[in-house]
Amino acid sequence: MTRALGPLIINALHYDDTVKKSRVIVRRASYDYGTLKPLIFGIADSLCGPMIRKGSRVVIKPNLLAPSRPDRAMVTHPLVVKAVAEYVLEKGGRPQISDSPAMGGFGKVLNESGLGEALKGMEVEFKEFRESSGFDIGEPFKKIDIAKDALEADLLINVPKLKTHAQMRMTLGVKNLFGCIVGLRKPEWHLRTGVSRELFATLLVKIHHALRPSATILDGILAMEGQGPGRSGTPRELGIIVASDDTYALDVAVCRMLGLDPYSVFTNKAAREMGHVADEIEVIGEVPIIDNFRFPDIAPLVFGPEKLHGFMRRHLVQRPLSEESACRLCGECWKYCPTKAISREGHRIRIDYNKCIRCYCCIEVCPHAALRTQEPLLGKAFRRLRK
Ligand code: SF4
Ligand code: SF4
């Protein structure tokens, strides 16, 4: 259930001119294009309109995780992307819609999501991120490969989906730009950051900071709760579009609306530690209170002395588990797993929990919702004890 409230100030520390202030816009919305289009036009006008010049190449980055119908809430709804692209065209810009899906191929995602059909006949370029350029994002990662088209765009408009995320808790604006890491370099980064969610979140924030989108327009009309961000998540209608020229502020504000401590989301925590979160976030528009939004169960990974980490990971941390009856042995999980912990064994899959780093990418890419997390008994007991 949602209720409309008045304007809201988040993170307000002081009220003087020296504090860093950001604004986040919230609008009640539906996928009725007649009302959605003017709403998106109004938002885009206030955020990035003056920056779009005749001939500007504007890269629009939706969440195109995998081939999926819009009613599954896995991808940004095609009509939201369409409205943004129409706006860019109206301003004389050249819209390019790009992503690097985790699975299924770009063409298949365009077909199944309905994006190709929705934008048919428009002067829009669909282009999968394929080429990368090296970009120094600073310590501890230094120079990393990021999609060239995103780095070199005149303007980048980030169009994420509001979803839960089994590893990061939520995927909102900052996490969406991980799609600008091309193809199998994504699982490589999971491998390099290992079991540290904090380190992975730091990487995500640094990628976002390298790209700095001019605007982020989040599709929260049909959102995803539960065990997102893939097919194991559950669609949940929230009826909101949230937008800002400050993605960090947007992510913090959305968490507050969902009734979640913003800094329990790893990317928000990393952004705050790096000094990117504004002191004062003004949320304008119809701010909803959203009741009983379901978040993924996230147990802490490892802590304490390093020599105990292997034991903790094996016996305390939630692990991916396959539902044999749902598994169709399609192979997406073992192709994507960064540590090659998954293999086929006859008519089932086998997960080597000694190799598994608990990144949950397999759950994210499984097209048949055949994987979920399961907390070992010892982990459950330990968590209760800690509480
Ligand atoms: S668990 Fe999912 S991704 Fe893996 S083989 Fe089975 S159906 Fe495919
Ligand atoms: S089995 Fe799944 S959770 Fe474990 S490392 Fe592979 S993809 Fe990540």
Image: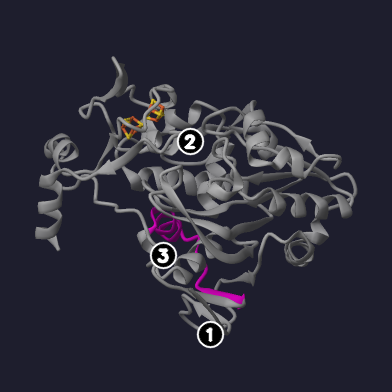
What residue do we see at 59% from left, 37% from top? Answer: 180
The secondary element bearing badge 3 is classed as: loop
Q: Does residue 147 appear anywhere in the picture?
A: yes
Real-space CA distance between mark 1 and mark 3, rounded to the nearest whole angstrom: 32 Å
Using a 10 Å C-alpha cutoff, classify the residue at mark 3 as few (fewer than 14 neighbours), some (14 to 19) or many (20 or more).
Answer: some
Could you say which quadrant of the image residue 196 lies in? top left
Range covered by the magenta-colored residues = 265-284
Using a 10 Å C-alpha cutoff, classify the residue at mark 1 as few (fewer than 14 neighbours), some (14 to 19) or many (20 or more).
Answer: few
What residue do we see at 68% from left, 59% from top? Answer: 31
Q: How is the image coloured?
A: one colour
What residue do we see at 47% from left, 61% from top? Answer: 275
* Left-right relation of 337 to 135: left
Question: Residue 29 versus residue 175: which sits nearer the camera?
Answer: 29
Type of amino acid under label 3: Phe
Instruction: Tell me the residue that label 1 is attached to.
Output: 15
Instruction: Tell me the residue that label 2 is attached to.
Output: 142
